[in-house]
Image: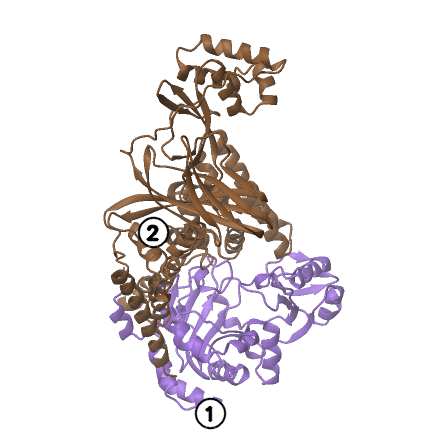
Chain colours: A brown, B purple
């Protein structure tokens, strides 16, 4: 059997891969190394609505440069819609319009923000003071009581805001506060009471930036003015100051999204953080239609952030192939370590390792009991799945109770895969003893950690995300490794006694 | 601590990758694997081809037949109940003799007919089979192993593994269970592997946990005096497994019965590499020599070739 066709295929894949990468490097000036890095957040708002058949106008508030973030550029995608940007004193709005539209509509707005700590804070004029709104009885006396208490304990607008929040949400929350909250939304109530005390304030919407998140919503914050200055408060905790990761989206009184001529409109946000070299401007280039210019950057952001992970999976697979074929490490489940490594990316390494060990060890104990029940396999694994979900829920609740927010990321573990891991390890324990469980469990974790380190390496992330041609090269390498008939590293040790004689 | 690849190559040691690509993938057709993964199929096939194997007393294929067990074994003093697709010796029940509904295991423990029926029922529900698929229970007559092995083994039956490549017996070892291996004959669980000379069936070299040993760790018996009776009959039996299955690279597990001589216990389409350690020699050289032989040679000629070329004493 000739191996020639095989090597031709491998050479072809290599050639295509290298060719595509070099083409992209030269034609689009994408550097091979991440170089000097700067962090850029790509934020995308996706508006969905059901158009009724007639004219449709969609107004979406859009953000501006602000403290910490500089707006680099914006794109919209909305086939057939006309687009204008409207600026008012306190907000900026993207307005899409169309004469007739029917059915489900998707409109995209995306903006890239450079992380720029030196950027001055946005000049947002104070809102008009509205003291004309009347309270209904009995809310008037309740509001009066709460406000008086807070006013006495405060010295200026900021301390007044803090005190009000404490009165309304803190552990000392009184009868009056509870009554008010049955009628009014918390932030709305705060604005109203501050206004009543002569302090200009407004609700403000912001987006918490978290890498790779999709389907996020805006969160509501309280903006309080003291003369020309202003400060931001978290209405839930009363904490003053803008969190570093908060991107202020919209400050006006109008809602973020307004739609005429459609119904069931929603807006959701997706974001990814990219490291760009200072000279690079891939993301800002208009998408190229030619086949060779294919790049992930032409996709909507939501899919881009998905692909950023998907394109790393071949790297994980390559590492598994190398560790098994070249080194001879035993793992439990061939590609289970890659999925665990993907979970580690979300949880960070240490939390992930601790979480994995806790879940698997607790699972093994419970699975050990299940094996006494002599159940059929499918029922047993299903029982283990439910057990794993229960363990994960308990750990999340307990760690949250102890203030360890990192514990919540345990939900990123692939639960079905974990259940199978527990099942396999348990059978291994019964058949081969605990030593083999340690060997295979340790091998799996070691593989997962190496895969994690590779998949989080900035250079590897840069290359896989920006050069699709690399996938062909990975394919060729894996094919070549599948053809390797030499010794595994660990076999050199295993067969050592044969040499000694 | 570590051997150099060149040292291993010069001793013709083959590694997992080479075994998988060069021998298993090339000489074992995937479609033939079920013949050896199901012990019942192997047994029926062996019967067709005149390859001796422990007598099949009966099979039980469905739960309502479970009550037939007592009737099936009535005429047989000793018998073994095993799952057709089991692995690692799980679910195997050995009964040495029985009278008035009391069944005695080799350890002396006694069981009732209900205990037997429960084991059969568990086998049928797939408790011991790979991936938990429904299985068949086989009842075989008990192997009475040759007394000459009594000092060489702890509890279990010693079995002889012969690597058969394209019908040629290329390498052999006997696996002796130990206390460490819990009476099982699996080398990685601590059984002693003794390499056997292909020409004579005499012991060459012994290993436990991949390291050389001189005596059996439990009985203290020196291993270099071990010799297999009716060695040529055993080689012929192993070689015949090629025609029987069509698989080019197999590990044949055989036992020597006191009354019936060599018998085929089961076949393995993915035999391990530890046999190289027990023989102190790699498989590579012998496999290459066999690879250069023409197809269509009969069993006796193949055994004669192996004896002539692979003898080491």
* Residues tagged by mark 2 and mark 1 found on one chain of the structure: no
Q: Which residue is drawn at 28% across and 65% down?
A: A23
In the foreground, A26 or B24 = A26
Q: Vertically, is A398 above or below B50?
A: above
Q: Which type of secondary structure does the marked residue at label 2 adopt? A: loop
In the foreground, B220 or B142 = B142
Left or right of B50: which side holds A65?
left
Q: Which type of secondary structure does the marked residue at label 1 adopt? A: loop
Q: Which residue lies furthest to the front in this view?
A: A99
Protein chain holding label 2: A
Query: Residue B76 has which mark?
Result: none
Q: Vertically, is A105 above or below A391?
A: below
Left or right of A470: which side holds A389?
right
Q: Residue at x 47, y 90 (%)?
A: B300
Residue A165 location, x and y as percent? 48, 19
Quarter of the figure that contains the N terminus of chain B: bottom left
Is any atom of residue A295 visible in this view?
yes
Q: Vertically, is B87 above or below A225?
A: below
In the foreground, B155 or A486 = A486
**How many circles with numbers are drawn on the protein?**
2
Q: Where is mark 2, residue-wise?
A: A283
Residue A198 location, x and y as percent? 45, 14
Q: Where is mark 1, residue-wise?
A: B296
Protein chain holding label 1: B
Residue B26 location, x and y as percent? 43, 79
In the foreground, A91 or A422 = A91
Q: Which residue is drawn at 59% across and 72% down?
A: B39
Q: Which of marks 2 and 1 is in front?
A: 2
As measured in the structure, the alpha-carbon distance from the residue carrying label 2 to the one carrying label 1 is 67 Å
Left or right of A148: which side holds A69?
left
């Amino acid at each position: 059997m000739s191996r020639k066709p095989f090597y031709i295929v491998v050479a072809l894949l290599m050639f295509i891969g290298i060719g595509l990468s070099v083409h992209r490097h030269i034609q689009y000036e994408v550097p091979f190394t991440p170089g000097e890095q700067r962090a850029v957040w790509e934020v995308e708002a996706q508006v969905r609505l059901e158009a009724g058949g007639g004219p449709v106008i969609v107004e979406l508030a859009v953000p501006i440069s602000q403290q910490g973030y500089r707006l680099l550029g914006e794109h919209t995608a909305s086939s057939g819609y006309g687009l204008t940007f409207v600026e008012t004193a306190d907000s900026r709005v993207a307005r899409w319009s169309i004469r007739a539209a029917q059915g489900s509509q998707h409109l995209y707005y995306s903006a890239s923000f450079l992380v720029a700590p030196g950027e001055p804070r946005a000049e947002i004029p104070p809102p008009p003071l509205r003291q004309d709104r009347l309270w209904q009885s009995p809310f008037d006396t309740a509001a009066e009581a709460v406000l008086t208490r807070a006013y006495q304990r405060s010295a200026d607008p900021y301390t007044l805001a803090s005190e009000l929040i404490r009165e309304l949400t803190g552990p000392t929350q009184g009868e009056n506060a509870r009554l008010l909250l049955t009628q009014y939304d918390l932030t709305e109530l705060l604005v109203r009471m501050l206004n009543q005390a002569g302090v200009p304030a407004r609700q403000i919407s912001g987006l918490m930036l978290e890498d790779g998140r999709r389907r996020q919503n805006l969160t509501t914050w309280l903006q309080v003015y003291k003369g020309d200055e202003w400060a931001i408060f978290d209405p839930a905790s009363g904490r003053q100051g803008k969190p570093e990761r908060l991107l202020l989206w919209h400050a006006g009184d109008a809602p973020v999204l307004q739609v005429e001529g459609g119904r069931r409109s929603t807006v959701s946000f997706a974001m990814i953080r990219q490291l760009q070299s200072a000279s690079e401007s891939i993301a800002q280039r208009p998408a190229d239609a030619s086949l060779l210019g294919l790049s992930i950057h032409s996709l909507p952001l939501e899919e881009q952030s998905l692909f950023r992970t998907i394109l790393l999976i071949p790297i994980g697979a390559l590492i598994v192939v190398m560790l098994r074929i070249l080194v001879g490490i035993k793992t439990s489940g061939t590609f289970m370590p890659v999925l665990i490594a993907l979970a580690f990316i979300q949880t960070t390494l240490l939390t992930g390792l601790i979480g994995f060990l806790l879940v698997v060890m607790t699972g093994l104990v419970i699975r050990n009991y299940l094996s006494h029940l002599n159940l059929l396999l499918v029922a047993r694994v299903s029982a283990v799945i439910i057990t794993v979900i229960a363990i994960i829920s308990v750990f999340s609740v307990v760690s949250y109770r102890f203030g360890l927010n990192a514990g919540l990321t345990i939900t990123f573990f692939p639960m079905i895969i974990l259940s199978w891991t527990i099942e396999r390890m348990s059978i291994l324990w019964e058949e081969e003893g605990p030593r083999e469980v340690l060997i295979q469990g340790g091998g799996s974790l070691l593989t997962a950690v190496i895969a994690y380190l590779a998949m989080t390496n900035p250079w590897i992330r840069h290359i896989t995300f920006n050069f699709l041609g690399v996938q062909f090269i990975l394919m060729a390498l894996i094919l070549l490794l599948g053809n390797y008939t030499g010794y595994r590293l660990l076999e050199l040790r295993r067969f050592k006694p044969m040499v000694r004689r | 601590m570590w051997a150099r690849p060149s040292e291993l190559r010069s001793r013709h040691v083959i590694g997992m990758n080479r075994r998988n690509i060069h021998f298993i993938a090339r000489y074992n057709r995937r479609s033939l694997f079920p013949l050896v993964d199901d012990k019942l199929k192997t047994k029926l096939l062996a019967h067709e081809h005149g390859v001796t194997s422990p007598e099949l007393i009966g099979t039980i294929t469905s739960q309502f037949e479970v009550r037939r067990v007592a009737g099936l074994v009535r005429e047989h003093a000793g018998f073994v109940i095993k799952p057709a697709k089991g692995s690692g010796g799980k679910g195997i029940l050995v009964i040495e003799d029985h009278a008035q509904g009391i069944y005695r295991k080799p350890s002396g423990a006694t069981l009732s007919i209900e205990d037997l029926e429960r084991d059969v029922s568990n086998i049928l529900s797939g408790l011991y089979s790979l991936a938990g698929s429904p299985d068949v229970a086989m009842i075989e007559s008990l192997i009475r192993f040759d007394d000459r092995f009594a000092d060489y083994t702890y509890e279990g039956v010693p079995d002889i593994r012969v690597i058969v490549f394209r019908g040629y017996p290329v390498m052999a070892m006997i696996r002796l269970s130990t206390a460490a291996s819990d009476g099982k004959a699996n080398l990685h669980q601590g059984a002693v592997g003794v390499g056997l000379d292909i020409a004579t069936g005499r012991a060459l070299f012994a290993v436990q946990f991949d390291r050389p040993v001189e005596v059996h760790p439990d009985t203290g018996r020196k291993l270099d005096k071990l010799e297999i009776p009716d060695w040529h009959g055993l080689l012929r039996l192993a070689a015949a497994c090629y025609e029987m299955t069509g698989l080019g690279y197999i590990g044949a597990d055989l036992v020597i019965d006191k009354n019936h001589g060599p018998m085929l216990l089961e076949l393995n389409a993915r035999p391990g590499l530890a046999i190289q350690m027990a023989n102190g020699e790699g498989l590579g050289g012998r496999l290459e020599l066999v690879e250069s032989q023409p197809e269509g040679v009969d069993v006796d000629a193949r055994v004669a070739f192996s004896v002539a070329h692979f003898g080491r004493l």
